[in-house]
Structure formats: structure tokens, C-alpha cells
């Protein structure tokens, strides 16, 4: 059950015809709802030692940075191409409405760093899987991934595979 379902808005045909876009901006501007979401994200990794939150540009940054502060963890950005200034590792991927590339700094993690991956939406799973691969490629130990919204009808979870658990606060 999502107590804040009314704060997630369906926008038909954005950014392309046929896509129903889950708009989280009404939720973000609601102070109590935003606090609840950050608390719920923290709940998905309660009891785990977490050194770093890694989050995906750009909507993932909103939740990831707030969660890092709440948990007393650090923050590592996984960015769209050409944005990170030092040496990077990158991967091309497909998402629900296009293709893109994600990059991470090659030295993003201290040895043995325990990492939680955060994003706002799991749709086809291409983005989250690309981020998982990058974290592993640069030596992070992935503890879990958590998304706020899972579009279960797109079956992205099927691609996630074994290893770290994949949590979702709300499923559609
Ligand atoms: O599961 P998938 O099909 O891969 O789609 C999920 C991704 O799509 C959106 O990102 P987008 O690239 O639109 O970036 P944004 O956060 O900058 O809006 C969303 O924030 C997820 O990262
Ligand atoms: N339908 C959707 N709504 C919001 N973000 C998305 N990212 C990928 N698909 C999405």
C-alpha cells in the first residue's frame, strides 16, 4: 500500500507516445511525504552496515543524497556521460524510452566499501542493471538496491539476477 499514491501523477505520452510517465514532483514538494519516503528507504536496509549510497542521475540523486544523510553514509554519483571529471568507467544501456550511457569514477569506492544503490523508478530495468554492473566494475560491494517505484508490468526485476536484494517501496 502506498499512503502517498495521490502524490504520484500519471502523465500520458511523456516523453514519448505510449509511455505513461510517473511524475514524482508532487511527492517531492510535500514535506511530510518526502520525509516518509526517506524513512521507508532507510527501512529497506535497516540492520545492514552501509558505507556509501550510490545513486543514478538525476532523480536518483534526490532520494540518494537525502538517504545518505539520514543513514550517516557517503554518496557516490552515477552520472550521464561526460559529467564526471576524473577517470571513469562507463556502460551503454537501454531504458523504457531510449538509450543512454552511465559513468562512475574509477576510484569511487574505498576497498571493501558496502554500497546501497538508489533510484526513483525501476521500469524495464536497463538503468539499474547498468548501475549494478558499474558498481561491481569499480570494486564496490553491493549490499542492496532500492527504488521508490517499481513498474512491475514492465518486468525489470527479471533482469536483476541474484546477489544483492532489490527492494521497491511501491509497485504498480
Ligand atoms: O528501468 P528503466 O527502463 O531503465 O528506466 C528507469 C530509469 O528511467 C529514468 O531515468 P531517466 O534516464 O529518464 O533520467 P532522469 O532521472 O534524469 O529523469 C528513471 O529515473 C530511471 O533511472
Ligand atoms: N514510466 C516511467 N515513469 C517515470 N520514470 C520512468 N523511467 C522509465 N520509465 C519511466
Image: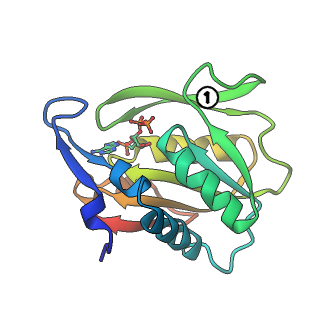
Q: Nearer the viewer, residue 97 or 157?
A: 97
Instruction: Give residue 33's quadrant in the image.
Output: bottom left
* Up-down relation of residue 156 to residue 146 (above or below): above
Is residue 121 left or right of 109 when viewed as pictured? left
The secondary element bearing badge 1 is classed as strand
Res. 81 visible in picture: yes
Quarter in which the N terminus is drawn: bottom left
Quarter of the image where ligand 1 sits: top left
Residue drawn at x 54%, y 48% is 62
Between 113 and 171, the residue placed more toward the observer is: 171
Rendering coords of residue 37 (x, y %): 47, 66
Please state if 127 lies on the left or on the right of 48 as rendered.
left
Q: Identify the image quadrant of the C terminus.
A: bottom left
Question: Measured from the top left, where is residue 80 in percent x and y?
Answer: 54, 28
Residue at the far bottom: name it.
47
**Which residue corresponds to mark 1?**
90
Against 130, residue 33 (above or below) is below
**In the rendering, at what x and y percent does residue 30 appear?**
41, 60
- The residue depicted at 25 percent of the width and 30 percent of the height is 15
Amino acid at each position: 500500500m502506498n499512503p502517498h499514491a495521490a502524490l504520484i501523477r500519471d502523465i500520458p505520452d511523456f516523453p514519448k507516445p505510449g509511455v505513461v510517465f510517473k511524475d514524482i514532483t508532487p511527492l517531492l514538494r510535500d514535506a511530510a511525504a518526502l520525509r516518509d519516503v526517506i524513512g521507508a528507504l532507510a527501512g529497506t536496509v535497516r540492520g545492514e552496515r552501509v558505507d556509501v549510497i550510490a545513486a543514478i542521475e538525476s532523480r536518483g540523486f534526490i532520494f540518494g543524497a537525502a538517504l545518505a544523510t539520514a543513514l550517516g553514509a557517503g554518496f557516490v554519483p552515477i552520472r550521464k556521460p561526460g559529467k564526471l571529471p576524473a577517470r571513469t568507467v562507463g556502460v551503454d544501456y537501454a531504458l523504457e524510452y531510449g538509450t543512454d550511457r552511465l559513468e562512475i569514477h574509477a576510484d569511487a569506492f574505498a576497498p571493501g566499501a558496502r554500497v546501497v544503490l538508489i533510484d526513483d523508478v525501476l521500469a524495464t530495468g536497463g538503468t539499474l542493471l547498468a548501475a549494478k554492473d558499474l558498481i561491481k566494475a569499480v570494486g564496490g560491494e553491493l549490499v542492496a538496491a532500492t527504488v521508490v517505484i517499481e513498474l512491475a508490468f514492465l518486468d525489470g526485476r527479471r533482469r536483476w539476477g541474484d546477489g544483492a536484494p532489490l527492494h521497491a517501496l511501491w509497485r504498480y
